[in-house]
Image (tube, grey):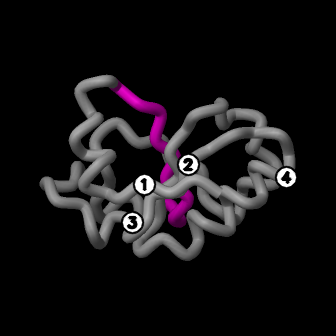
Amino acid sequence: MKNITAATLADQLANHPTIIDVREDFEFATGHVPGAKNIPLSELAERYPEVPDGAYIICQTGGRSAGAAEFLQAHGTAVINVAGGTSAWPKPLEV
């Protein structure tokens, strides 16, 4: 599985990457990466077709996103896990 650091992804925001936050709705609402789309891990089995190839998968610390990335790859979607998650995000989170 491909991994990227939160800092490296932050440097790429100007390119408008697709970022999927797999935290639950209430977690996402407390602060998320600007432009991220919320698809909670609890809904991923039904909503995985919404995730395009090349998307960055993020959660709070990188554990859930790693599991989500493995699931997505097993279903034929090439994604990148964001190691460290929003806890390692070097810029302000959007609320």
Kind of residue sitting beneath label 2:
Ile
Which sits earlier in the primary sequence, circle 4 or circle 1? Answer: 1
Secondary structure under tag 4 reads helix
The answer to if 57 sits in the magenta stretch is no
| Residue 68 vertical position relative to residue 62 in the rendered view, above or below | above
Question: Magenta residues, as a range?
Answer: 16-25
> What is the residue that sits farthest to the front in this orientation?
2
On the image, numbered disc 3 is attached to which residue? 85
Of discs 4 and 1, which sits in the foreground? 1
Asked if residue 87 can be seen in this view, the reply is yes
Count of numbered circles on the image: 4
Which sits earlier in the primary sequence, circle 4 or circle 2? Answer: 4
On the image, numbered disc 2 is attached to which residue? 80
Quadrant of image for the N terminus: bottom right
**Percent x, y of residue 24:** 53, 65
Kind of residue sitting beneath label 3:
Gly
**Percent x, y of residue 57:** 53, 52
- Residue 89's disc is none
Are circles 2 and 1 on residues that touch, CB within 8 Å?
yes
